[in-house]
């Protein structure tokens, strides 16, 4: 795999997408930035990262036969790859928070942004953006829920070594995806999903607060929540929040 290291860029996903427009990319080509000045999360939210302390990178993956309606399994594969790597670091209560945050206990340690290009009914290419808090110890005041590997374990981590470990995990799980082991990926994802089968307070996009239990992930990748009257509602990204 090819790794491109940048001293600074606004967004590794944007850089990688621009690169793909100019020349064919080797599968798993990765762009990693020491300083990402305008990192993006889901729905144009911002990812803030201290230079030299964390991993901010994007990986290019091309597919031959992954259908658009199967994109939730790509999310499962990538989220589980990060989860599995962090699981080896003895962090407290690692979980995946839908759609694709990784938590240690209740604190966010990693964010994932997946952007796809399509050809007909198939996913042609994916640009996997990762922001992983590694050695950062002080966060801006508004990031009250953030944590890092160093804060959780007290250890300093080699960023290059950690990046390589994650990329190997990506390759392993993408092979599962290509072998269409969808049920296995979904079962594993649901087993480590934050608040799964736990009565939880939620707030919808109208500001309404309700109690429910996470039931699963729908065909289209939406979060399924079972209400107290046993109805199951589905929510897209930014349509529901945890309280």
Image (tube, grey):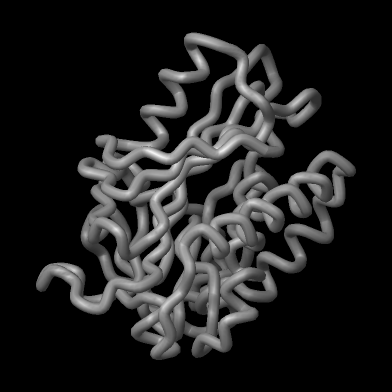
Q: Is residue 191 above or below residue 38?
A: below
Q: Residue furthest top?
A: 22
Q: Is residue 50 left or right of residue 63?
A: left
Please say if 134 is above or below 3: below
Left or right of 4, for residue 136: left
Residue 9 position (above or below residue 164): above
Residue positioned most to the left:
141
Spot occupied by residue 108 in the image (x, y as percentages of width and height): 37, 71
Measured along the vertical axis of the image, is residue 97 above or below residue 45?
below
Front residue of 52/172: it is 52
The residue under the point 57% across, 63% down is 161
Along the horizontal axis of the image, is 59 left or right of 111?
A: right
> Is 103 on the left-hand or right-hand side of 38?
right
Picture quadrant where residue 147 is located: bottom left
Q: Residue at point 61% right, 42% down? A: 220
Q: Quadrant of residue 240?
A: bottom left
Residue 171: x %, y % from top left: 74, 48
Q: Quadrant of the N terminus?
A: top right
Q: Residue 18 is drawn in which quadrant?
A: top left
Give the residue furthest to the right.
Answer: 179
Q: Quadrant of the C terminus?
A: bottom left
The residue under the point 70% across, 22% down is 122
Percent of width and height locating residue 177 = 79, 45
The picture places residue 217, in percent across and down from the top left corner, at: 62, 57
Figure disc tally: 0
Residue drawn at (65%, 21%) of the image: 124
Nearer the observer, 83 or 57: 57
């Amino acid at each position: 795999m090819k790794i491109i290291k940048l001293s600074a860029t606004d967004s590794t996903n944007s850089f990688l997408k621009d690169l793909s427009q100019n020349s064919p990319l080797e599968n798993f080509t990765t762009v990693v930035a020491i300083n990402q000045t305008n990192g993006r999360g889901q729905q144009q939210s911002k990812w803030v990262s201290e230079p030299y302390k964390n991993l901010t990178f994007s990986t290019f993956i091309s597919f031959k036969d992954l259908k658009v309606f199967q994109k939730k399994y790509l999310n499962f594969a990538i989220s589980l790859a990060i989860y599995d790597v962090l699981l080896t670091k003895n962090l407290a209560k690692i979980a995946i928070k839908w759609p694709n945050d990784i938590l240690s206990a209740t604190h966010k340690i990693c964010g994932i942004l997946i952007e796809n290009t399509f050809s007909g009914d198939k996913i042609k290419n994916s640009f996997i953006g990762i922001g992983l808090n590694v050695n950062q110890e002080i966060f801006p005041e508004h990031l009250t829920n953030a944590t890092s590997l160093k804060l959780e374990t007290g250890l300093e981590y080699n960023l290059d070594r950690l990046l390589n470990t994650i990329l190997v995990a990506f390759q392993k799980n993408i092979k599962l995806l290509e072998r269409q082991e969808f049920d296995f990926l979904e079962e594993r994802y649901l087993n480590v999903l934050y608040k799964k089968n736990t009565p939880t307070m939620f707030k919808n996009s109208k500001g309404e607060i309700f109690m429910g239990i996470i039931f699963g992930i729908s065909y289209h990748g939406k979060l399924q929540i079972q209400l107290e009257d046993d109805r199951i509602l589905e929510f897209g990204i930014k349509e529901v929040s945890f309280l």
